[in-house]
Amino acid sequence: MNNLFNDLSDKIKKIKSFNDFDPLKLSILEDINKLKQRDTEKDFQLKKYLKDKNIINSLLVKTSSDLHKIAKESSMHANELDILLNTILAFVFFKDPAYCYVLAVEDNLIDQIVN
């Protein structure tokens, strides 16, 4: 695009009188039309990129709100399990990853089960 501006600028600098303008007139008009076409293309690309940006932004907002909702639900579920295990009269055991029995009321076990 810079080359086109430079060419157009050089052509305009060559014009010293009306007689100089006449032979360059068509060439200058062609360059101006090329600039208009490129401007139209860039405008179209900009509009497309703005639409794409808006779509991605709306998806990110939806995804982040879903993540906040899931985190809140997970926290509530962990609290419910904690209350249940602390109020139950019987001992509750879980198997850990090594398949050993672990008493459910031990610290941080609820968090490990939920996570």
Image (cartoon, helix red, strand yellow):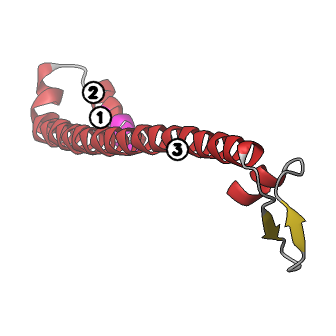
Q: Amino acid at mark 3?
A: Leu
Mark seen at residue 47: none
SS at circle 1 = helix
Report, in whole angstroms, how far the alpha carbon at label 2 lies from the one at label 3: 60 Å
Look at the image and tell me in which quarter the N terminus lies. top left
Rendered location of residue 40, percent (x, y)? 19, 40
Asked if residue 31 lies left or right of residue 56, the reply is left
Report which residue position mark 2 lands on. 12
Q: Quadrant of residue 42?
A: top left
At horizontal 28% and vertical 33% (from top left) the residue drawn is: 11
Above or below — where is 20 with respect to 7?
above
CB of mark 2 within 8 Å of CB of mark 3? no
Rendered location of residue 73, percent (x, y)? 54, 42
Q: Amino acid at mark 2?
A: Ile
At horizontal 66% and vertical 40% (from top left) the residue drawn is: 79
Asked if residue 99 lies left or right of residue 59, the reply is right
Q: Crowdedness of circle 3 by 10 Å Cα count: few (<14), some, many (20+)?
A: few
6 magenta-colored: yes
Task: Report the front residue among 115 and 8.
Answer: 115
Task: Report the front residue among 111 and 104.
Answer: 104
Q: Nearer the viewer, mark 3 or mark 1?
A: 3
Asked if residue 21 lies left or right of residue 105, the reply is left
Report, in whole angstroms, how far the alpha carbon at label 3 lies from the one at label 1: 55 Å
Report, in whole angstroms, how far the alpha carbon at label 1 lies from the one at label 2: 6 Å
What are the residue bounds of the magenta stretch?
A: 3-8
| Residue placed furthest toward the front | 89
SS at circle 3 = helix
CB of mark 1 within 8 Å of CB of mark 2? yes
Report which residue position mark 3 lands on. 67
Report which residue position mark 1 lands on. 8
At horizontal 24% and vertical 37% (from top left) the residue drawn is: 43
CB of mark 3 within 8 Å of CB of mark 1? no
